[in-house]
Amino acid sequence: MNPTKETILFDDALTLWGKEFQIMMAIEEMAELMQKLSHYLRKNRKVKYTEIASEIADVQIMMRQLIQIFCILDIVNQQEALKLNKLQQYIEKAKRGESADSSQS
């Protein structure tokens, strides 16, 4: 789906159900992904990858809606770049046998 159709779709959802409801849906979708991943670990990995993929897709859709609701695409992109850079630094330190100064966030 191209961004214009997606934007319209998300606007329609916002108009129909409202900002607060969509935020709650995002929280619920994240919880469902957490539960599916927990089941994967707890049940000796007897969860189908398609189930995990479905929950990830739901979360990704809701994250894009939140970005649109709060008009924060540029900020999210900037934060993502910073966090990827931080991850790269942690990996490089780990490869050199150094410990990271702080935990990932």
Image: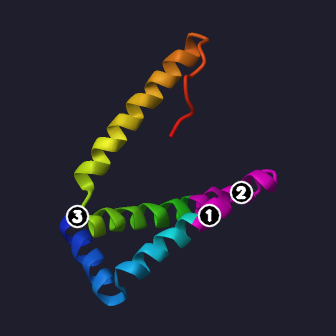
Q: Secondary structure at mark 2?
A: helix
Name the image colouring: rainbow
Location of residue 31 in the rendering, given as x and y in whole percent from the top left corner: 60, 66
For the residues marked 1 and 3, what is the alpha-carbon distance in whole angstroms? 25 Å
Which disc number belongs to residue 68?
A: none
Q: Residue at x 81, y 51 (%)?
A: 44
Mark 2 = which residue?
A: 38
Look at the picture and state if 72 lies above or below 69: above
Tell me the SS state at disc 1: helix
- The residues tagged by marks 1 and 2 sit, at their Cα atoms, a distance apart of 12 Å
Position of residue 88 in the picture relative to residue 10 (left or right)? right
**Highlighted magenta segment, given as a residue range:** 31-52
Give the foreground label among 2 and 3: 2
Secondary structure beneath label 3: loop
- At 54% from the left edge and 64% from the top edge, which residue is drawn? 30
As for residue 101 lying within the magenta part, the answer is no
Query: Mark 1 touching mark 3, by CB under 8 A?
Result: no
The vertical placement of 24 against 38, above or below, is below
| 2, above or below 88, in the image | below
- Relative to 43, 9 lies left or right: left
Cα gap from disc 2 to disc 3, whole angstroms:
33 Å
Question: Which residue is rendered at x = 27% and y = 49% of the image?
Answer: 75
Give the amino acid at mark 3.
Asn
Left/right of residue 4 with respect to residue 44 in the rendered view: left
Find residue 72 and report its horizontal and vertical position in percent.
26, 57
Q: Amino acid at mark 1?
A: Glu
Camera-side residue of 57 and 38: 38
Mark 1 sits on what residue?
A: 51
Q: Earlier in the sequence, mark 2 or mark 3?
A: 3
Q: Which residue is mark 3?
A: 2
Quarter where residue 97 is shown:
top right
